[in-house]
Image (spheres, helix red, strand yellow):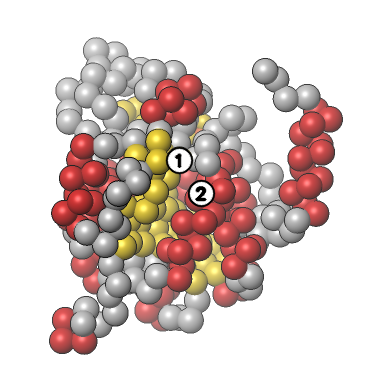
Amino acid sequence: MRTRPTEIAQKLKEITEQGLFSARSGNIPTWCPGCGYFGIHHGLTTAIHKMGLKHHEVVIVSGIGCAGRYPFFSSTYGLHTVHGRALPVATGVKLARPELTVFAVGGDGDGLGIGGGHLPHIARRNVDVNYILFDNSIYGLTKGQPSPSSPLGFKTKASPQGTKDQPLNGTLMALSYGATFVARLFAGNPDQIAEVLTQAVQHKGFAFLHVYTSCVTFDKEFKTWEHLKKWVHPLPKDHETSDIKQAIVLAMDDPFAMGIIYKKARRLGPPENGG
Ligand SMILES: Cc1ncc(C[n+]2csc(CCOP(=O)(O)OP(=O)(O)O)c2C)c(N)n1
Ligand code: SF4
Ligand SMILES: [Mg+2]
């Protein structure tokens, strides 16, 4: 069923009155209509607003890609850096200005492909950065090549016979690298994104938020809205977030379970300080 313009106008009015647009910049996002990134944007800006974070005390660092454009659409500080380098730049920002709240954002190509070598190190150092991986399993900006998280056999213009490579499991990687807060989320559920981001910011240490999202322009086959809506589901009721073994099994066996998969209470610093 199509949403009517009057309904959209009413919804916009409600959102504006609640102040939920306050963390958005005046730049209208240049993403394609229907792109999942709008849902992530709504989740992140809602979280910033609801936490009462002052915009000049927040920095959003991105790499390159459609996801990499994010800082232009936020009224916080932002850095649009080099492809795959959001995490080392975010680490530098946090080390230089520990009082700031730092988010790193980027796509699956940016974070698991060209930048894949940075994830283990920010995780093992437990740097207090909140990393949101916008995972649409495709290179959106460069017009639809397969990415490291594309499924086996994924057909694109650049892989007409289907990919021959096994996909990476970003959630499992973050857990095995020692990330102390790991969540899987769905761009179609911005309220949950906002809620989990709030907990991630409160968590002192590296937080990895793996958001499944849709590239409506170049992926008509895999992470479509229709599929994602059908596939995603909540974590099992008995899931114990402090149990790393349960978290690893879940990350491997239940790739569409959404929520906080693992959270470790851990202080920053060397092991003798409880790190
Ligand atoms: C060093 C370098 N190599 C390659 C590119 C070309 N490039 C730009 S964005 C991109 C991939 C984007 O995919 P992803 O990170 O998944 O982001 P999305 O566009 O899907 O949000 C590539 C290969 C580049 N800009 N710089
Ligand atoms: S190309 Fe895909 S990822 Fe990029 S803005 Fe368009 S729908 Fe979104
Ligand atoms: Mg992508």
Q: Which mark is residue 128?
A: none
Q: Residue at x 50, y 50 (%)?
A: 193
Q: Nearer the viewer, residue 82 or 162?
A: 162
Q: Residue at x 79, y 31 (%)?
A: 7
Q: Is residue 211 above or below residue 138?
A: below
Query: The residue tagged with tag 1: helix, strand or loop?
Result: strand
Spatial distance from mark 2 to mark 1, Cα to Cα?
8 Å
* Left or right, 245 with reference to 79: left
x, y (%) of residue 19? Answer: 74, 58
Q: Which mark is residue 186?
A: 1
Q: Is residue 196 above or below residue 126?
A: above
Q: Residue lying farthest front?
A: 238
**Is residue 40 in view from this perspective?**
yes
Q: Residue at x 25, y 82 (%)?
A: 269
Dot placed on the residue nearer the N-terminal end, 2 or 1: 1
Q: Residue lying farthest top?
A: 161
Query: The residue tagged with tag 2: helix, strand or loop?
Result: helix
**Is residue 84 in view from this perspective?**
no
The kind of residue tagged 2 is: Gln
Tag 2–tag 1 contact (CB < 8 Å): yes
Q: Residue at x 23, y 19 (%)?
A: 153
x, y (%) of residue 13? Answer: 81, 45
Q: In which quadrant is the N terminus drawn?
A: top right
Q: Between label 2 and label 1, give the one nearer the viewer.
A: 2
Q: Which residue is mark 2?
A: 192
